[in-house]
Amino acid sequence: MTPASSKTSPPRRRSLADRGIDGVTLLLVPAALFVVVVFVYPFLYGLALSFAPKEGGPFGNYIRFFSDPYMYGTIWLTLRLAVPVTILNIALSVPIAMQVRHMKHQRLLTTILVLPITLGTVLVAEGLLNYLGPQGWLNRTMILFGLIDRPIRLVHNYWGVFISLVITGFPFTFLLTLSMISGIDPALEQAAATLGARARHRFRHIVLPLIVPGLAVTFCLAFVDAFSVFPSAVMLGAPAGETRVISFAAAQAAFEQYDYSYASAIAMIMAVVQFGFVGLVLAVRGLFYKGPAGGGKG
């Protein structure tokens, strides 16, 4: 053995793969930076700004909000819109998705059903003003056929916003529900039908237990979307009255009062209500669904 061969070779530098960092992990870096810049930083900045009121201590904005019934009442008014709309959209999407999955021209019908989501909230609101207004097509048609004597008030109130949220929120809920139901193995229902189970029994004992966990997540996403309503509440509702939603209160504080600290506090309250409701729904889901290993009860 030569003296040179007895020397210890220099340590090899560890590659990224040796450190557990592969190409897929590196692809996540831009997405992580995007989330930090677009979501995390604005949220943290708004949270810090909410504790810097123009008057009072750090909690001055929150004390101001909850000491004014006109302000904290916006939470109830927003929930009064968001919860029924979400429940109705879920209730409509399940039976429609059950029928659409078996249709021959499923793609065409699905495209028609999701068309409102491509129009945008503002365009849908403008269309509803022309359709549901006192001189709109609906009222004029009903008067022409003698169904009513005078126009029905369907805009600039609760129902105008409600209808708008259903139209714009249904496509989103429907697509998620259709993807869940279409993913169920048809052999399960066919086997049950062979054993004599009727359609409603197959839905209750096979389809429903399989989609309930996904429906809970869909419910949360649809609720968050409806809870953040703003254009519909302004254009089709009564912003000073029954449709004074919490997002409108935040916009007024920011762009009319120029109190961005107070607006940030209202936005944080809005986020807490949303997270609280979503947490409640997921907790209820957890009582009936224990994951893939445990399956659903019943």
Image (tube, helix red, strand yellow):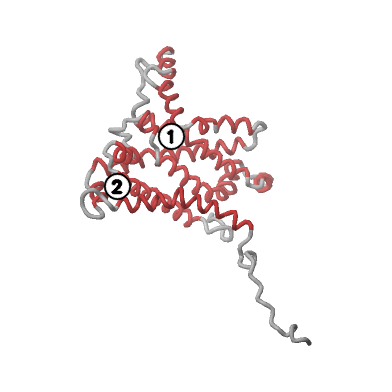
Foreground label between 1 and 2? 2
List x then y, in percent, for residue 15: 64, 66
**Quarter the N terminus occupies:** bottom right
Where in the figure is residue 201, as x and y percent of width and height? 58, 45
Amino acid at circle 1: Leu
Q: Describe the element under mark 1 as helix, strand or loop.
A: helix
Under tag 2, what secondary structure? helix
- The answer to which image quadrant residue 82 occupies is top left
Where does the image place residue 43, in percent across and percent down from the top left?
A: 39, 50
The one of 181 and 243 positioned closer to us in this rendering = 243
The residue singled out by tag 1 in the image is: 165
238 sits left or right of 162 in the view? left
Please count the marks in the image: 2
Front residue of 288/192: it is: 288
**In the image: residue 182, left or right of residue 214:** right
Instruction: Residue at 34% x, 27% y: name it.
Output: 156
Residue drawn 31% across the image and 30% down it: 238
Outermost right residue = 1
Q: Dividing the image into 4 quarters, which one contains the C terminus?
A: bottom right
**Could you classify mark 1 by the number of other residues whose Cα lies within 10 Å: few (under 14), some (14-19), or many (20 or more)?**
many
- Residue at mark 2: 261
> Pointer 1 and pointer 2: residues touching (CB < 8 Å)?
no
Q: Earlier in the sequence, mark 1 or mark 2?
A: 1
Residue beneath the point at 35% across and 30% down: 237
- In the rendered image, which quarter is residue 248 located in? top left
Q: Residues within 10 Å of mark 2 (few under 14, many from 20)?
A: many
